[in-house]
Amino acid sequence: MNKVSIEVKNLKKFYNNSQAVKNINFKINKGSIVGLLGPNGCGKTTTIGMMLGLIKPTSGSVFINGQDIDSEKNRTNLLEKMNFISPYVELPKRLTVEENLKVYGRMYGVNNLGEKINDLMEKLNLIEFKKRKTGELSSGQKNRASLAKALINDPEILLLDEPTASLDPDVGDYIRGYIENFASKKGTTIMLASHNMNEVERLCDEVMMMKNGIIIDKGTSKDLISKHGRKNLEETFLKIVRG
Amino acid sequence: MKLHRIYALSLRHLYLIKGSFPRILDLIYWPTIQIILWGFISQFFTMYSDYYNNTIGVILSCAILYDFLFRSSISFNMLFLEEIWSRNFVNLFVAPLKINEVITALTSTALIRTLIGIIPAIILMSPLFGVSLLKMGPPLFLLFLSLYLFGTTLGLLVTSGLLRYGPAFENTAWSSLFLLAPLGCVYYPLSILPEWLQILAKGLPLVYIFEEARSILVNNVVNYNSIMTALTLNLFYFISAIIIFYLSFYGARKKGTLINMGE
């Protein structure tokens, strides 16, 4: 059985004359959680976009379960097993939480959808907001609704772009706990892009540091901290980024 | 192509319509206003124009046919813009949707949206102005089909622009149909246009549709050749628009606009 879930090979992306991603390579094993850290504009979003097949690489490839996601033939099949959450992407505001989950559940071809929706709503404390329009929810509740959408298809691969950005510490902690629990139960492969170093330290088996379109360092949080002689991941991040 | 995915995307928009009475009202409001306005204008022309003498329904019927075309096109654009405005665009394109499923879902939902607006207006025509579109008989269905195809074609072209150039292309969504209206000969015969414009107009299916509608209403003559010409031209434009939509999608992937849409 193939242990590698995501393989990125010689990936490059040019926008006009500027190079957003410069020949990056990495592999993520099935069931592991990998953090992607880097300052704004370092190429994280472009990398995630290419991993989702939303952006066409200038050269290089992204293999999901051994299949190139850039191929139109593979893309739809692979996306059935993936999902994505980002604070910059929202669910339609005028639809209720339940309606949104019904739409996305059908889109992903989820069996026993009603049961699945109830289960997710219960676990994410959304039951009382079931009939509430998504636009009327607080940011924490919206975030949980988006997470429910991202988990509706029990994804094998989950790409999380700042999943707890702008949440209060309590809700943020709840979301982190839920993701941690979900991943360990389902064996989900997760790539997490975040600016929250505690989050990355808590959740990720491995961390990749990105700067100016290049992965400049990678390893476990512990290894990176000791390698750079810092007290925690935040200081390590600052040293790498400013160095 | 998977039916459940097409249904899901349609459902997203049907929920939106179902959940908002003002939205339904808005869909019905404009076609109804159009009918009332053109109803009175056509009454005036009937009284003072030789061409339209005793043919009260001609202008009104053409107005409703044009409004059907306008609504088809705008509905298609609106469904697409709705995803950009609600910042849901990326969610859709990271879902396992194929482009042909997106096109099918938007095309069928746009029809439902258009019919919600246009049916009450058609029903109102009879008690208000004594005009019934149904008098045109079976060819009416073919004319509607042609208009719907052309409306969807324009919708596909505008959304291709939105995909490729982002929300900045939004204004074109609103103005696209006004650009073609003068060439469509909606309210006047083709012969009114200068000769060089006639050549351009003949390249559009609209001329054949509206000339035919007038021919049926004024002379009671159905010319299936015109109807077939319109349908053939429509099919050509429709297939071309689908190809352009695909090319725009690939262009957007290259340019990276899909992930930033709406920002």
Image (tube, rainbow, N blue to C red):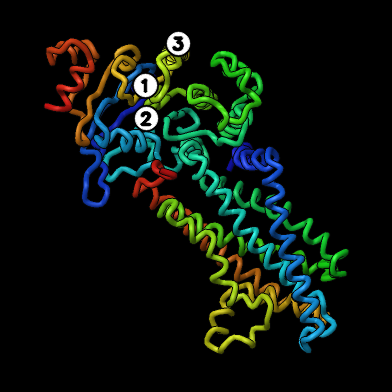
Few, some or many residues within 10 Å of mark 1 (<14, 14–19, 20+): few
Using the image, determine if residue B155 lies above or below residue B46: above
Q: Which residue is mark 3?
A: A181
Circles 2 and 1: CB distance less than 8 Å?
yes
Task: Judge if badges 2 and 3 mark residues of a common chain.
Answer: yes
Q: Position of residue A204 (x, y in %)?
A: 32, 16
Q: Secondary structure at mark 1?
A: loop
Q: Disc 2 vs disc 3: which is toward the camera?
A: 3
The chain identifier of the residue carrying mark 1 reads A
Amino acid bearing label 2: Gly
Q: Is residue A242 left or right of residue B1?
A: left
Q: Which residue is mark 2?
A: A66
Q: Which numbered circle lies on residue A2?
A: 1
Residue shown at 80% from the left, 81% from the top: B46
Q: Nearer the viewer, residue A88 or B217?
A: A88
Q: CA distance from mark 2 to mark 1?
A: 8 Å
Q: Secondary structure at mark 2?
A: loop
Q: CA distance from mark 2 to mark 3?
A: 26 Å
- In the figure, residue A40 lies in which quadrant? top left
Using the image, determine if residue B97 lies above or below residue B186: above
Mark closer to the chain start, 2 or 3: 2
